[in-house]
Amino acid sequence: MTKMHKGKRYLRSGLSVLLGAGATLGGSFLISRIREKQDVEIRLGRLEQMLEQVGEGKEAPGPAPKKAAPRKKK
């Protein structure tokens, strides 16, 4: 009987670890999907805003022009 009880205890411990690992992986997957959806919504919002500006005849704001680095004197 003691071998059976030890086996059940090990089985219960193993299942607990697997359940915890599954919950962690599942939670991180859900969080990543939510973040991805928010990123897509933000990008679509920016595209819509740019299209509205182009439709109104305004130029869409682009990245700021880079300034030339000052040259060092020798």
Image (tube, rainbow, N blue to C red):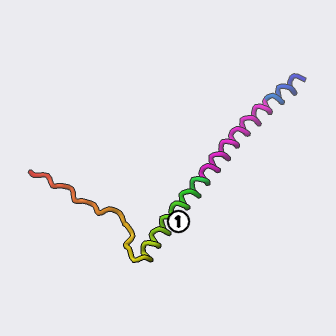
Residue 13 at what x, y percent from top left? 76, 31
Between 28 and 48, the residue placed more toward the observer is 48
Horizontal side of residue 38 vs 50, given as left or right: right
- Is 45 drawn above or below residue 57 in the view shown? above
Residue 43 at what x, y percent from top left? 50, 63
Mark 1, secondary structure of its residue: helix
Based on the picture, tell me whether residue 40 belongs to the magenta stretch. Answer: no
Taking the spot 61% from the left edge, 49% from the top edge, the residue there is: 31
Taking the spot 90% from the left edge, 23% from the top edge, the residue there is: 1
Based on the picture, tell me whether residue 22 belongs to the magenta stretch. Answer: yes
Mark 1 highlights which residue? Answer: 44
Circle 1: residue type: Leu
Question: Hey, which quadrant is residue 8 in on the image?
Answer: top right
- Is 27 drawn above or below residue 51 in the view shown? above
Between 33 and 19, the residue placed more toward the observer is 33
Horizontal side of residue 13 vs 70, given as left or right: right
Taking the spot 75% from the left edge, 35% from the top edge, the residue there is: 16
Taking the spot 59% from the left edge, 51% from the top edge, the residue there is: 32
Q: Callout 1: few (<14), some (14-19), or many (20+) C-alpha neighbours within 10 Å? A: few
Q: Main secondary structure of the magenta part?
A: helix
Residue 21 at what x, y percent from top left? 68, 40
Q: Which residues are magenta?
A: 10-32
Horizontal side of residue 39 vs 23, given as left or right: left
| Residue at the outermost front position | 56
Question: Hey, which quadrant is residue 64 in on the image?
Answer: bottom left
Between 65 and 48, the residue placed more toward the observer is 48
Between 73 and 66, the residue placed more toward the observer is 66
